Amino acid sequence: MMMNDLPASRLLRGELKRDEPLARYTTWRCGGPAQTLYKPRNRADLATFIGQLPAEEPVTVIGLGSNLLVRDGGVRGTVIVLHPALGALEVRDGLVYAEAGVASPKVARFAAMHGLADAEFLAGIPGTVGGALAMNAGCYGGETWRFVASVEVLTRAGVFDHRSPSEYAIGYRSVRRADGTDPVGLFTSAMFAFPSGNSGIARERIRALLKRRIATQPLDLPNAGSVFRNPQGDHAARLIEACGLKGYAVGGARVSEKHANFIVNPHGQAKAADIEAIIGHVRTTVSAITGIVLEHEVRIIGDEK
């Protein structure tokens, strides 16, 4: 029996919705509905909800909806929106404890405030800790898992478990189990080991980073961050621009004229199919001209309409 056939459990305290449009939960502002959407009240509520789901129920977890393209046909099964429930952020024994729903820039500011260094890059990641853990997000020379001391995951049985980085194979925008298989369980928090530093210098680095982002990225328009991974020794934006693709448009979406590795939805009218068509065209064109095959780093989920 699927979750959509079940009444809401009397034990649940969160918000359960059916056929909920996901465009309002993604930074691209497009995409079809979730068959079922759940917003847990807190950690315990999330564990209760996960634990009661049928084993065959597909589960998709989203945070702030950045780095995510939801196809126009929507998402089958259950979508869980994490960030309202998992928001704890504190220092524990010299380490930064951050739950999966905390925005990455908030961690950067928190670390700087507590005299910790090298977390500044997180200010440039427009997502949550959970998403950063899931894909080893990074920018400006920093990567999430470089500073992970331990992670907590929630299993489908509704049980929290702690794991060490040694249990994972970490790569560029990639997180796998040590044996190369997909990770099992939902990342719910992490302990970060940032070195001691100068609070004033860290805050100044964050200000400089944010100033650079505003100057070089189309942050005033709906987007999902960088679309393609940088190939080794090069930058996707340089390749896309060199191929004359800035401004290339399909429907209501287009390649940003400000930063070629961004696709924007200027008027909020683009369909997910428009964006996916641009991704395909950019990939094909860059491959034909340069011989380099770009791989998208945005997560694409759901059914085509």
Image (cartoon, grey):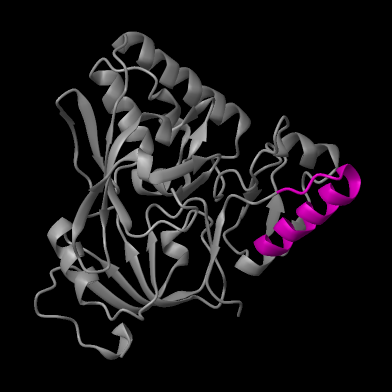
Residue 238 position by quadrant:
top right
Point out the image quarter for the N terminus: bottom left
Q: Is residue 65 left or right of residue 14?
A: right
- Is 11 colored magenta in this rendering? no
Q: Is residue 233 left or right of residue 223?
A: right
Give the x, y percent position of residue 198.
Answer: 31, 8
State the predominant SS element of the stretch in magenta. Answer: helix
- Is 279 colored magenta in this rendering? yes
Image: magenta residue range:
275-294
Q: Residue at x 26, y 77 (%)?
A: 53
Q: Residue at x 67, y 63 (%)?
A: 276
Q: Of residues 195 and 107, which is closer to you in this image?
A: 195
Give the x, y percent position of residue 225.
Answer: 55, 44
Q: Is residue 44 left or right of residue 155?
A: left
State whether residue 128 appears in this view.
no
Residue 3 position by quadrant:
bottom left
Give the x, y percent position of residue 59.
Answer: 37, 71
Considering every residue shown, the one lying at the far left of the view is 11
Considering every residue shown, the one lying at the far right of the view is 289
Tell me: residue 90, above or below residue 62.
above
State whether residue 63 appears in this view.
yes
Point out the image quarter for the C terminus: bottom right
Task: Please count the marks in the image.
Answer: 0
Q: Residue at x 30, y 57 (%)?
A: 82
Give the x, y percent position of residue 143.
Answer: 47, 32
Q: Residue at x 65, y 46 (%)?
A: 228
